Image (tube, rainbow, N blue to C red):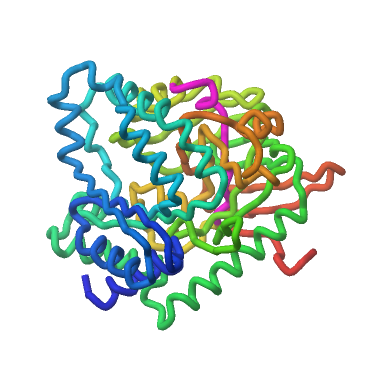
């Protein structure tokens, strides 16, 4: 990776992503294959005046060792001191940067029950922590961290070095790092996303109708739902960009008012496995049936995590012409594939996607229709054959996506 471009990428992650201010505390999570990027990111945090920077390094082989060699009872335990440590950082407002590469099928041979028990124990232990993120004053950013494993999945006919370089080329282009002025390029992109956000909020749709191959789904929207896209803003007015890249405008569906069938248009990488060719059937908001050609047991495990896991917590609109989609690649990464395609999420809704939701209890948000769950799993439903129509309370219908592309006029009020 060219050092100049690596530095520019770090500047985008730190300056546009989490937007580090003088005096900020920062937590950086990174994988072992991307130490060079993490060094550049940490250096940029310090350069911008961070008060403290903590780096947590993760390794796929160490994760795998626990599942392959650990005693059976370790999968039902999440240590209290880890929860206390995380909560201490939340109280000190440690803003969070995650540099991720998908684990792909790392855990493909592991018993599904172990994975479910381990993730459930962690989710239950960490649930009290969610209130700090819901409050909206902790900035966070997720960005891609290329790995050889990931690169070879995308470019199997290349050498490891060439595959890694090819993946870097894609990331640099999609994340606007190759622009003469990446900061200006991101500001322009954010303005486009905000224009679409405003248009959707002004329409105040009661429900959306999704139509496509093997898809016919009515999704009612939560009371006081709010469309969001691009940058977020903390309560004290600091702007940041949670996902790099980002192409979506998202909101909160009503957890009890979704009916029909939806077919996923891309594979899903989750719990260390790849689920392919799957679909869901919903009645009164609840998933009552599903099918999958590959690794359907993962879907069954997810749906069994809690009652909210069977309901939708997010819907997001993304045009088929997005830069990620136009790359022609299936990235096997939720961060990238969700920005190539409209998507839904099973599980927990975002507090910020309800008007006033940041200051509400989970119970109050649930009364408005926002789902609650220990999971939040995105799956992709978009493509060039998807039609999305919005319906207002007065019965007027408005095309939103036609053949996978925006049909809206952001300049219209």
Quadrant of the drawing holding the N terminus: bottom left
Does the magenta portion include 308? yes
Q: Position of residue 170 (x, y in %)?
A: 33, 65
Q: Position of residue 32 (x, y in %)?
A: 19, 51
* Rendered view: 103 above or below 364: below
Observer-nearest residue: 10 or 144? 10
**Residue 340 in sight in this render:** no
Left or right position of 33 against 386: left
**The image quarter in which residue 256 lies:** top right
Left or right position of 18 against 61: right
Outermost right residue: 394
Q: Position of residue 251 (x, y in %)?
A: 62, 46
The residue segment tinted magenta is 305-318
Observer-nearest residue: 191 or 104? 191
Does the magenta portion include 14? no
* Rendered view: 283 above or below 42: above
The residue drawn where x is 55% and y is 34% is 262
Quadrant of the drawing holding the C terminus: bottom right
Count of numbered circles on the image? 0
Q: Position of residue 235 (x, y in %)?
A: 61, 56
Outermost top residue: 73
The residue drawn where x is 63% and y is 46% is 353
The residue drawn where x is 58% and y is 59% is 233
**The image quarter in which residue 157 lies:** bottom left
The residue drawn where x is 33% and y is 47% is 332
**Residue 180 in sight in this render:** yes
Observer-nearest residue: 49 or 214? 49
* Rendered view: 206 above or below 70: below
């Amino acid at each position: 990776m060219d050092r100049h471009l690596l530095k520019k990428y770090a500047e985008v992650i730190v300056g546009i992503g989490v937007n580090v201010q003088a005096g900020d505390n920062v937590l950086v999570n990174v994988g072992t294959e991307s130490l060079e990027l993490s060094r550049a990111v940490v250096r940029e945090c310090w350069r911008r005046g961070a008060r403290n920077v903590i780096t947590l390094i993760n390794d796929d082989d160490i994760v795998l060792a626990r599942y392959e060699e650990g005693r059976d009872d370790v999968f039902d335990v999440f240590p209290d001191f880890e929860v206390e440590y995380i909560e201490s950082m939340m109280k000190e407002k440690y803003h969070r940067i995650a540099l991720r590469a998908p684990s792909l099928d790392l855990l493909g041979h592991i018993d599904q029950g172990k994975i479910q028990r381990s993730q459930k124990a962690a989710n239950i232990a960490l649930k009290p922590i969610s209130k700090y993120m819901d409050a909206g004053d902790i900035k966070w950013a997720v960005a891609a961290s290329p790995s050889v494993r990931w690169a070879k999945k995308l470019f199997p006919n290349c050498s490891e070095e060439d595959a890694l370089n090819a993946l870097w080329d894609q990331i640099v282009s999609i994340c606007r790092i190759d622009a003469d002025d990446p900061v200006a390029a991101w500001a322009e992109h954010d303005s486009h996303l905000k224009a679409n956000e405003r248009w959707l909020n002004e329409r105040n749709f009661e429900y959306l109708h999704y139509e496509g191959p093997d898809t016919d789904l009515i999704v009612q929207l939560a009371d006081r739902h709010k469309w969001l896209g691009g940058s977020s803003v903390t309560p004290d007015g600091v702007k940041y960009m949670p996902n790099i890249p980002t192409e979506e405008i998202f909101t909160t569906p009503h957890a009890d008012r979704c009916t029909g069938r939806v077919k996923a248009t891309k594979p899903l990488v989750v719990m260390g496995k790849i689920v392919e060719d799957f679909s869901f059937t919903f009645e009164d908001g609840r998933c009552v049936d599903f099918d999958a050609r590959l690794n359907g047991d993962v879907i069954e495990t997810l749906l069994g995590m809690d009652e909210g896991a069977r309901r939708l917590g997010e819907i997001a609109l993304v045009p088929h012409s997005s830069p990620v989609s136009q790359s022609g690649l299936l990235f096997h990464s939720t961060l990238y594939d969700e920005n190539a395609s409209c998507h839904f999420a099973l599980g927990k809704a975002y507090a910020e996607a309800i008007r006033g939701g940041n200051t509400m209890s989970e119970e109050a948000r649930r009364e408005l229709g926002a789902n609650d769950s220990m999971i939040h799993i995105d799956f992709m439903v978009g493509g060039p054959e998807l039609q999305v129509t919005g319906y207002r309370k007065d019965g007027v219908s408005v095309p939103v996506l036609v053949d996978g592309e925006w049909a809206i006029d952001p300049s219209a009020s």
